């Protein structure tokens, strides 16, 4: 009897171990610089993979597995993936072949179940050639001389829609995804910004795909952004909670990031405030980083204050003052960065509002109003927005105008190429923000 029981246990154990895992679904997320392929699987799998050329393809062999159906194929605009096919191998195993458009590097890993998905096998495809990121050069300052600058640049604002691709973010009561509404709002905001003279928006995420958090910061720095704005929608277990809020990086988050930058400065080609940390001793690097972070955080708080004023005109503000948290996307040491929670998607009313184009348009204009208010006072030197216009009224003289703007009359005269002291009523002159004579 004991022998029979042992044999039964062995048989049951073997059956459990030999249970066939099914690949139930395939999802493909194509980004501009990578493609993610996600296989939804019924349980953990043993797998191996390799690449082949002529033609280029990646082969994944999954032990003791079956594919239910490949119901997705890559779109034509996918830069890396041409197609997906499969076949049974050794009667029990599954071979999946990714037909590629070019040689690639790849990363393959498994993910444990979460609230939305079960077990997953993930393959990330990206270029074999590592982009050589040029060291950022500090923007050329407008020379403090008597010459009027011939060309001024736009203020650049990086707009980052949170989540994306396999990461839907928060999900509303009726099934609305955070990743979808924030992308639509980000596109609205970028469009509105680009209508403004002297302002230009760049979208960090343009479609339904995921970008790693630190890569979002890197993209903003590649565009030499003057401001980073991350758009999100909040969620809470109590569906009655509602309202928008604005976050900046917490001091704790800034301290941990400073330690990271200082630890990696020898291997980093990044610039902080226009100065590389490379080849600087620890004390000098620490001082430079502290100065840059302090300036960026102060600017972030100023921007957030202006944005909150704008948001109050649209609806309820959940937190009336600027909040702080150690969000990764806010950790750029030299770019003022803010995170806007546009509302609680877990609140049925706000989920409905965020899904409405007209409401998103109102929110976009409210955020823009806040950004314009900030740059009206603190536009970076050398930008169109850093210039102030003054329309000559009856009784105006160069000396009274100079006194009003606390700048020398000679500076105004030479900047505007005015000969003598003659001014015409209705004439528009530019008052440079640089107060040096």
Image (cartoon, grey):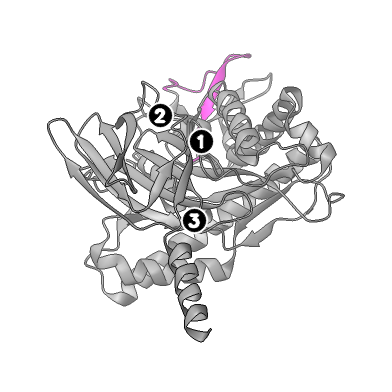
For mark 2, what is the residue? 152
Query: Dots 3 and 1: beta carbons under 8 Å?
Result: no
Q: Secondary structure at mark 3?
A: loop
Whether residues under marks 1 and 2 lie with C-beta atoms below 8 angstroms apart, the answer is yes
The magenta span reads 417-433
Outermost left residue: 54
Residue ID for mark 1:
386
> Which label sits on residue 63?
none
Q: Is residue 437 visible?
A: no
Quadrant of the drawing holding the C terminus: top left
Q: Position of residue 274 (x, y in %)?
A: 34, 52
Q: Nearer the viewer, mark 3 or mark 2?
A: 3
Under circle 2, the secondary element is loop
Measuring from the top left, give residue 356's x and y in whole percent. 75, 26
| Most common secondary structure along the magenta stretch | loop
**Can the viewer see residue 203 in this picture?**
yes
Q: Is residue 421 magenta?
A: yes
Q: Nearer the viewer, mark 3 or mark 1?
A: 3
Front residue of 157/168: it is 168
Label 3 to label 2, Cα distance in Å? 58 Å
Q: Which residue is mark 3?
A: 43
> Could you tell me how far apart the alpha carbons at marks 1 and 2 are, in whole angstroms?
9 Å
User: Residue at the spot x=72%, y=37% of the render?
Assistant: 175
Q: CA distance from mark 3 to mark 1?
A: 58 Å
Residue farthest bottom in this picture: 2
- Give the mark, 1 or 2, whose residue is nearer the N terminus: 2
Q: Earlier in the sequence, mark 3 or mark 1?
A: 3
Q: Within 10 Å of the Cα at label 3, are there few (<14), some (14-19), or many (20+) other Cα atoms?
A: some
Which is nearer the N-term, disc 3 or disc 2? Answer: 3
The structure residue drawn at horizontal position 16% and vertical position 30%, both measured from the top left corner, is: 55
């Amino acid at each position: 009897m004991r022998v029979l029981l042992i044999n039964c246990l062995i048989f049951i154990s073997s059956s459990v171990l030999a249970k066939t895992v099914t690949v139930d679904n395939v999802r493909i997320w194509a980004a501009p610089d990578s493609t993610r392929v996600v296989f939804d699987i019924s349980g953990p799998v043993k797998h191996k993979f390799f690449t082949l050329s002529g033609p280029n393809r990646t082969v994944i062999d999954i032990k003791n597995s079956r594919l239910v159906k490949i119901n997705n194929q890559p779109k034509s605009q996918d830069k890396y993936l041409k197609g997906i096919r499969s076949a049974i191998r050794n009667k029990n195993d599954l071979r999946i072949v990714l037909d590629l458009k070019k040689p690639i590097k790849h990363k393959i890993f498994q993910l444990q179940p979460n609230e939305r998905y079960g077990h997953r096998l993930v393959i990330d495809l990206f270029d074999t050639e590592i982009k050589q990121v040029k060291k950022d050069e500090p923007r050329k300052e407008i020379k403090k001389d008597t010459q009027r600058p011939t060309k001024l640049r736009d203020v650049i604002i990086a707009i980052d829609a949170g989540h994306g691709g396999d990461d839907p973010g928060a999900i509303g009561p009726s099934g609305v995804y955070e990743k979808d509404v924030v992308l639509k709002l980000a596109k609205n905001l970028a469009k509105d910004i680009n209508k403004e003279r002297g302002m230009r928006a760049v979208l960090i995420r343009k479609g339904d795909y995921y970008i790693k958090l630190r890569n979002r910061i890197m993209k903003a720095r590649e565009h030499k952004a003057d401001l980073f704005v991350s758009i999100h929608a909040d969620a809470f277990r109590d569906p009655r909670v509602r309202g928008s809020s604005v976050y900046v990086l917490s001091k704790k988050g800034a301290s941990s990031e400073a330690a990271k930058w200082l630890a990696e400065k020898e291997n980093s080609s990044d610039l902080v405030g226009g100065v590389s940390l490379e080849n600087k001793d620890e004390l000098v690097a620490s001082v430079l980083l502290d100065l840059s972070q302090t300036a960026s955080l102060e600017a972030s708080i100023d921007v957030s204050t202006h944005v909150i004023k704008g948001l109050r005109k649209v609806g309820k503000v959940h937190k009336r003052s600027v909040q702080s948290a150690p969000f990764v996307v806010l950790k750029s040491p030299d770019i003022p960065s803010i995170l806007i929670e546009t509302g609680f998607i877990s609140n049925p009313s706000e989920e409905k509002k965020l899904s409405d184009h007209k409401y998103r348009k109102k929110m976009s204009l409210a955020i823009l109003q806040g950004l314009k208010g900030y740059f009206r006072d603190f536009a970076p030197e050398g930008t169109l927005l850093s210039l102030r216009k003054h329309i000559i009224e009856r009784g105006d003289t160069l000396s009274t105008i100079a006194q009003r703007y606390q700048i020398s009359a000679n500076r105004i005269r030479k900047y505007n190429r005015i000969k003598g002291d003659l001014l015409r009523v209705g004439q528009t002159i530019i008052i440079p923000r640089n107060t040096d004579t």
